[in-house]
Image (cartoon, rainbow, N blue to C red):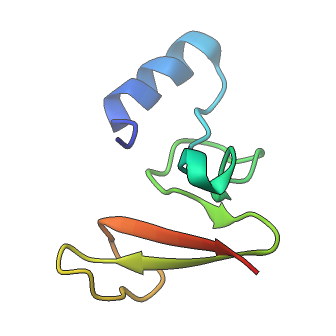
Amino acid sequence: MAVQEAVAEKWHMITRQPLIEAYGLTETSPAATINPLDLPKYNGSIGLPIPSTEVILRDDAGKEVPLGQPARSASAARR
């Protein structure tokens, strides 16, 4: 489940540090994507693929979604 923006804002208010999200299942090791560590604030994104990882974003019907568009799930594979 993605972090809710209200949670990220409260985190930032308390710690003065942005909450950095990543995405990955145990099958992909610790993560398949991650946001840049110097991100100035929460952006609601799963971030960028880690090196040697290919990511495909999909909608509710399982169809591929172009980069920059909202997606429901991500498939990741090591290259």
Left or right of 20, for residue 58: left
Of all residues, the one furthest to the top in this rendering is 14
Of all residues, the one furthest to the right in this rendering is 51
Is residue 33 among the parts visible in the rendering?
yes
Residue drawn at 52 percent across, 56 percent down: 46
State the count of labels.
0
Q: Where's the C terminus, which quadrant?
A: bottom right
Taking 25 as reference, is 4 above or below it? Answer: above
Comparing 68 with 57, the one in front is 57
Left or right of 5, for residue 51: right
Counting from the top left corner in percent of width and height, residue 68 is at: 45, 79
Residue 12's quadrant in the figure? top right
Counting from the top left corner in percent of width and height, residue 22 is at: 59, 47
Comparing 17 with 50, the one in front is 50
Taking 1 as reference, is 53 above or below it? Answer: below
Comparing 64 with 35, the one in front is 64
Counting from the top left corner in percent of width and height, residue 4 is at: 33, 36
Of all residues, the one furthest to the left in this rendering is 61
Residue drawn at 43 percent across, 19 percent down: 10
Residue 60's quadrant in the figure? bottom left
Residue drawn at 26 percent across, 81 percent down: 62
Is residue 23 among the parts visible in the rendering?
no
Left or right of 61, for residue 30: right
Counting from the top left corner in percent of width and height, residue 40 is at: 66, 44
Residue drawn at 62 percent across, 39 percent down: 20
Comparing 30 with 3, the one in front is 30
Left or right of 61, for residue 67: right
Taking 23 as reference, is 9 above or below it? Answer: above
Of all residues, the one furthest to the front in this rendering is 27
